[in-house]
Image: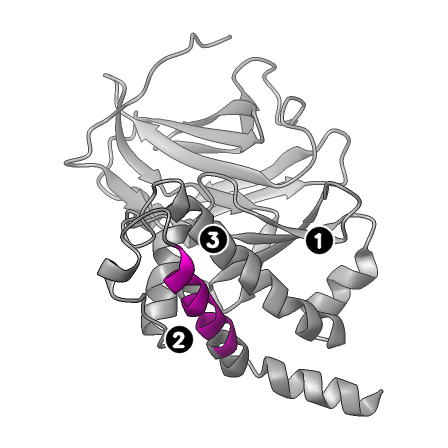
Amino acid sequence: MVEKNRTHRNSWGSCRIIQEHQIDLEIDVESNPPRISNFSIDERALRDLDESAKVRLYINRKLRRQSFDCGKVGRILSSPKDLISGDSALRTVGIGRYQWVVRISDQSGYVICQNKRSLYGSEPFIGTGENAILRISQGEVSNNKVWEIDFTEGNDLPVVVVDNSCESQFSSFMKREQELWHCFPQMVSSIIDELIELHCDGLGIGSHPEGTWQNSWVDSLSNRFDSPLPVESEYNSPTDALPLMGWKKKCIDKICNDVDIREKLENSEVQE
């Protein structure tokens, strides 16, 4: 049966947050089209919830979206069903990296439990777990480039996307081989350039809300890499980005030092 579209309302005061590691979502990307091969939620995350509450999974890729029925709290479906087609195939969103979120709602439509929007098809690249500052994935890259940085709205972190046709480059990055040590400063530069560009567009570099990748990066640069922003009065005008350019150079130097980028470059150059 096709379920009518319904607007879910968040009851933020009592909405429980499920951690990403408490949800097991597996997608068979070798299938044509891809399909959800397994889904489960840790029982501890569902403790004390109404067993009749509905569980829904929403998957997005670019501007495409699919909604899946995952059963109820008391009976989670291991093979979620698309609300339109009734099967587990990702016909609408297709192949690629997905954003996904699970929402559990009561009979009135109020969301009583959900996870933070997550990415499927990417993994921590620099740092691990909650300390990660960058993700990596394979996908479609524009303009015949080998890799690019994806800043898709809703991403918890920037993602290095390596083109599907460049398997050796992806493997080299993952193994921390020479190619990565040459490209990493450019990756960091691109991310900070994005922060500065947003600042010049009126989104203050020190004013991004918690939970955004921008806030996470500014916080990490300031606290983990000892590169705090300049005195606010020096860059409070969106058109005055010059102090931020000096800050950018310091950030690149500090991050590269902390992950031994220069040492790796020197070693690779000696070996050549």
Counting residues from the N terminus, which is met first, the one under dot 3 or under dot 1?
A: 1
Which secondary structure, mark 3? loop
Residue that numbered label 1 is attached to: 147
- Crowd band around label 3 with a 10 angstrom C-alpha radius: few (<14), some (14–19), many (20+): many
Give the image location of residue 239, x and y in percent.
37, 47
Judge whether 170 appears above or below 253 on screen: above
Report whether 119 appears left or right of 218: right
The span picked out in magenta is: 241-253
Judge whether 222 appears above or below 190 on screen: below
Of the pair 238 and 29, the residue shown nearer to us: 238
Type of amino acid at the residue the image marks with label 2: Phe
Counting residues from the N terminus, which is met first, the one under dot 3 or under dot 2?
A: 3
Q: Is residue 38 magenta?
A: no
Give the image location of residue 155, x and y in percent.
47, 45
Residue drawn at x 76%, y 65% as measured from the top left: 171
State which quadrant residue 225 falls in: bottom left
Type of amino acid at the residue the image marks with label 3: Leu
Residue that numbered label 3 is attached to: 157
Counting residues from the N terminus, which is met first, the one under dot 1 or under dot 2?
A: 1
Quadrant containing the C terminus is: bottom right
Q: How is the image coloured?
A: one colour
Q: Which of label 3 and label 1 is nearer to you?
A: 1
